[in-house]
Amino acid sequence: MPAPGFGLDNAVRILLVERDEAGARSLIEMLDRGFIIAPEIALACGGREAADRLRLASYDLLLADLDSLCDLSAEPEDAVARLARLASGSLVVVLSDGASVSATLAVLQAGAHEHVTRPVDGAVLSARLGELAHRHGRAIAGAFRGPAERERVAGLIDASSQLQTVLDFVARDLPGSAENLEGVARRIVAMFDGGETERRAASTESPMRPAVLPMWQQEQRIIEDAIESFAGNIALAAAALELSPSTIYRKRQAWAELEGKKGAA
């Protein structure tokens, strides 16, 4: 449970590191809309200025554009590590252009709590930050507006008492575009209702599709759909599913072997 005190009577303190004026303005607008009350945002135009600010004050959230840290160190990971050490009490989130598993792993290993790839809209960013704060038990989790993503995901499945657990899982642990999460939601539902959802889909899609899939294939679909929902970013999908990236790689190898045996049969 997040600690009380945020959301109604005080503002979240954010240090934003962004050298591009238009980019900074866009992020500030997103952040203003994402909290119950407008946060206090300090803007640093580079890594060195951010480091100076972190030595003088504490912040609840450090949101840093990776390219803007180049004046602090020629190696992006080193720059992230330096700021993460200075911001020991803050949630550290790094922004960068384009999705890359290697880049995500590098910034996470350097000490960041999350890596967000651009472009990203305000609702998704707010949902990601809110989920991150809840996951790490930070007080600012109570400062975010109610997630619109939960309402959008609710329309994807029947929110009966039997499936409410599924709805909660998708809304809490798989932040991001609700449209992209539809496949993930349906696969998880299939595991709860004994494959009935899959059987209904099979009747309209393909009469040759098996009514009940083996557990490894159900697991495969859940993981692959999660990876797809994060635009192929295995590290982010692994974090959402509470797995390690190496576990996903090992499972993929095992699935390939099982599919090979199935094809040879």
Image (cartoon, grey):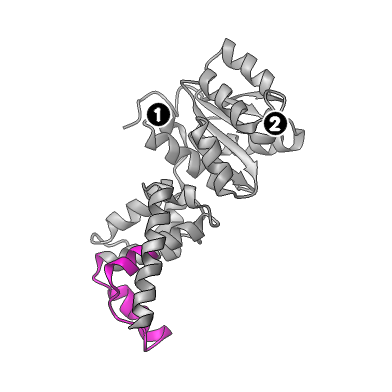
Marks 1 and 2, how far apart at CA:
26 Å
Q: In the figure, 193 relative to 77: above or below?
A: below
The amino acid pointed to by label 2 is: Ser
**Tag 1 residue:** 138
Q: Is residue 135 visible?
A: yes
Q: Quadrant of residue 166?
A: bottom left
Name the residue rendered at 32%, 82% in the picture: 210
Sequence-wise, which precedes: disc 1 or disc 2?
2
Q: Position of residue 40 (x, y in %)?
A: 58, 23
Q: Residue furthest bottom?
A: 207
- For label 1, the SS is loop
Name the residue rendered at 42%, 46% in the picture: 239
Q: Which mark is residue 9?
A: none
Q: Which mark is residue 68?
A: 2
Quadrant location of the N terminus in the rendered image = top left
* Residue span colored magenta: 192-220
- For label 2, the SS is helix
Q: Is residue 155 visible?
A: no
Q: Position of residue 82 (x, y in %)?
A: 57, 22
Q: Position of residue 151 (x, y in %)?
A: 43, 54
Q: Residue furthest right?
A: 21
Q: Quadrant of residue 220?
A: bottom left
Q: Are marks 1 and 2 in contact (CB under 8 Å)?
A: no
**Of residues 81 and 161, which is closer to you in this image?**
81
